[in-house]
Image (tube, rainbow, N blue to C red):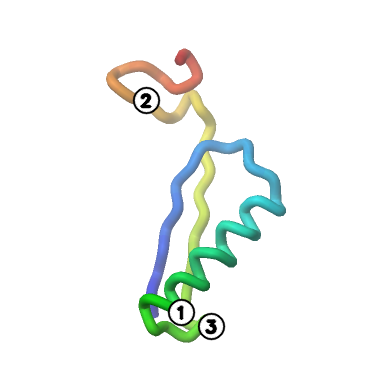
Amino acid sequence: MPEIQIDMLKGRSHEQIKQIVKDITAVMVKDGKAKPEAVHIVVREFEANHYALGGVLKSDM
């Protein structure tokens, strides 16, 4: 059972997230030989002020 976690900044539409999940599942089925129903995906979104790169909040970039 593949379990995939995706962390990303908020801002993508419901349709975009649906497509991302669909595409990642397809890759796991094709390349990972997993059954689609066995692929678990968790999408976690966070605000730009909860992520930093090089000591600078993404919201300040």
* Residue, disc 2: 52
**Amino acid at circle 2:** Ala
Q: Residue at x 50, y 19 (%)?
A: 59
* Residue, disc 1: 29
Say which of marks 1 and 3 sits in front: 1
Disc 1 element: helix
* Residue, disc 3: 37
**Amino acid at circle 3:** Glu
Q: Residue at x 33, y 24 (%)?
A: 53
Q: Earlier in the sequence, mark 1 or mark 2?
A: 1
Q: Mark 1 to mark 2: distance in Å?
A: 34 Å
Frontmost residue, 18 versus 3: 18
Q: Residues within 10 Å of mark 2 (few under 14, many from 20)?
A: few
Quadrant location of residue 13?
Answer: top right
Residue 16, image x and y in percent? 65, 51
Q: Mark 1 to mark 3: distance in Å?
A: 10 Å
37 left or right, relative to 57: right
